[in-house]
């Protein structure tokens, strides 16, 4: 039993005067030799200490998602452990225990997992075999390793959608470069490498027949390009009892010239029928995984108004960052509720919101500097998150800003203002 737990129990049941006494005692090793039978009023309480005991939770990965998880963890009785290769990663200084290690390495993950009660991830690129072994030995993993196995491999992920009749874009699985050449009838198409990519890496668009030769020589999914009307995402949490909590959908607005995410709006502007479709699809995706956790389901609404699943992330996600300030229970708070077995939180929005990613500017690489932060901090209802990454490079996610406002036009105006003002340079 952790000493603070014992003090908590003792204090609660023996009055505050004694609590100070025990706090004093606890600073000395002799406390460990106290016989609980001499504290009859506390004995019963000690038996219930498992409930009060801080749970030891490990997070694999120490980037911005881990960092924001830790910020939310501070509200609950959790002892946090993080493993990541870089000792100065964004999450390293916010956890109780940091382990330098490779989340893709079997031994590292297995050893890290043995010291905690439960594990979660903040990036999919983790060693699933070690997690499977830990799960067999009784550790709780959020999400279950079987889900990670399916999602990490784009081929398995697409087959999963197909096997549950979940609408997704037309696709063909290819083993190598040669197999792609025979798919001219699917042009324009998107090639997604089966494994290894994230944040747009490992994905390429092939528009015309003479570009087919650029196809990667890797096991891949070839998807027929969808005529996209809107890109939306929906976060869903599911606990061990199978109860679900679904957040309102968000809408991604892309820059038509740069083809980059411009900003993300919540709630998405959708007619009621489309909203119902998206919600039903997102719930179907999540429920069939048979795993507690939190999931982001990225979807397209096509020209015909059909909703198609693009990808699922089995973790907290960029499309849920606005929930920190704009919703009663944030995606990070929600995941802790799932892990700790607490009631699920309220997903309703307090106010409509917009979220802008702060991305490393083109042509700058090195120690990060933030230009225009002062002006952005002057905006009413703007919430700035700088992730604490030491080095910037073009396109790297360095932070985000969430703005709350009732009016959609105001949200759009403010998000453009933030994008113009704030630059990450070196
Ligand atoms: N992440 C995980 N999957 C997708 C993303 N964006 C987050 C995680 C991870 C971090 O991005 O928090 O640790 C890695 O960011 P970077 O800039 O070091 O590549």
Image (tube, helix red, strand yellow):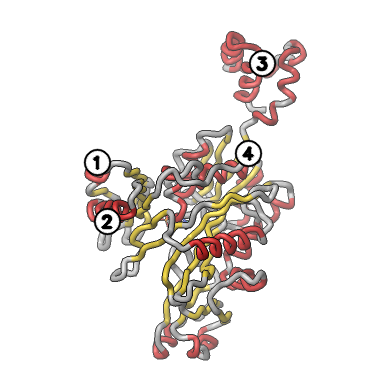
Q: Position of residue 297 (x, y in %)?
A: 53, 61
Q: Position of residue 204 (x, y in %)?
A: 43, 75
If you read the primary sequence from the N terminus, does the residue marked by circle 2 or circle 1 appear first? 1
If you read the primary sequence from the N terminus, does the residue marked by circle 1 or circle 4 appear first? 4
**Spatial distance from mark 4 to mark 3, Cα to Cα?**
23 Å
**Spatial distance from mark 2 to mark 3, Cα to Cα?**
55 Å
Element at badge 1? loop
Query: Residue at the location (43% across, 54% down)?
Result: 267
Residue on which the image places disc 2: 416
Residue on which the image places disc 4: 342
The mark closer to the camera, 4 or 3, is 4
Element at badge 3? helix
Residue 1 vs residue 238, the one in the foreground = 238
If you read the primary sequence from the N terminus, does the residue marked by circle 3 or circle 1 appear first? 3
Residue 426 visible in the picture: no
Query: Residue at the location (74% across, 16% down)?
Result: 36
Query: Residue at the location (64% across, 72% down)?
Result: 165
> What residue occupies the far right of the structure in this picture?
37
If you read the primary sequence from the N terminus, does the residue marked by circle 2 or circle 4 appear first? 4
Q: Position of residue 354 (x, y in %)?
A: 36, 52
Question: Quarter containing ligand 1?
Answer: bottom left
Q: Which mark is residue 378?
A: 1
Is 377 on the left or on the right of 67, as rendered?
Answer: left
Q: In which quarter of the image is residue 76?
A: top right
Residue on which the image places disc 3: 13
**Spatial distance from mark 2 to mark 1, Cα to Cα?**
15 Å
| Mark 1 neighbour density, 10 Å: few (under 14) some (14–19) many (20 or more) | few
**Spatial distance from mark 3 to mark 1, Cα to Cα?**
48 Å
């Amino acid at each position: 039993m952790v000493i603070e737990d014992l003090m908590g129990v003792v204090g609660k049941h023996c009055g505050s005067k004694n609590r100070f006494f025990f706090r004093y005692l606890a600073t000395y090793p002799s406390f460990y030799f106290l016989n609980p039978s001499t504290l009859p009023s506390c004995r019963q309480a000690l038996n219930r200490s498992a409930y009060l005991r801080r749970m030891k939770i490990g997070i694999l990965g120490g980037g911005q998602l881990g960092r924001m998880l830790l910020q939310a963890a501070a509200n609950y009785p959790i002892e946090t452990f993080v493993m990541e290769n870089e000792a100065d990663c964004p999450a390293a200084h916010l956890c109780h225990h940091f382990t330098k290690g490779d989340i893709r390495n079997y031994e590292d993950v297995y050893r890290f997992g043995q010291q905690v009660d439960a594990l979660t991830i903040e990036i999919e690129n983790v060693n699933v075999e070690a997690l499977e072994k830990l799960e067999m030995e009784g550790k709780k993993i959020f999400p279950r390793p079987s889900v990670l196995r399916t999602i990490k491999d784009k081929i398995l992920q697409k087959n999963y959608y197909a096997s549950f009749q979940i609408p997704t874009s037309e696709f063909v699985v290819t083993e190598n470069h040669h197999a792609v050449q025979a798919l001219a009838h699917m042009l324009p198409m998107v090639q997604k490498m089966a494994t290894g990519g994230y944040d747009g890496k490992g994905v390429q668009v092939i528009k015309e027949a003479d570009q087919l030769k650029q196809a990667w020589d890797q096991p891949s999914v070839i998807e027929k390009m969808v005529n996209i009307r809107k890109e939306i995402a929906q976060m869903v949490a599911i606990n061990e009892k199978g109860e679900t909590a679904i957040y309102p959908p968000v809408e991604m607005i892309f820059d038509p010239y740069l083809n980059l995410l411009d900003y993300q709006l919540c709630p998405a502007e959708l007619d009621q029928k489309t909203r119902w479709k998206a919600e039903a699809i997102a719930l179907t995706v999540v429920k069939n995984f048979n795993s507690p956790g939190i999931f982001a389901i990225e979807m397209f609404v096509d020209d015909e108004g059909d909703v198609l699943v693009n990808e699922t992330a089995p973790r907290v996600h960029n499309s849920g960052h606005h929930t920190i300030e704009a919703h009663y229970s944030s995606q990070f708070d929600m995941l802790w509720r799932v892990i700790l077995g607490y009631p699920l939180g309220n997903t309703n929005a307090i106010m409509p919101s917009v979220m802008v990613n702060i991305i490393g500017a083109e042509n700058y690489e090195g120690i990060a500097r933030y230009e225009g932060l002062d002006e952005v901090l002057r905006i009413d209802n703007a919430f700035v998150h700088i992730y604490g990454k030491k080095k910037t490079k073009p396109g790297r996610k360095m932070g985000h800003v969430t703005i709350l406002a009732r009016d959609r036009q105001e949200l759009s105006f403010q998000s453009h203002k933030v994008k113009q003002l704030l630059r990450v340079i070196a």
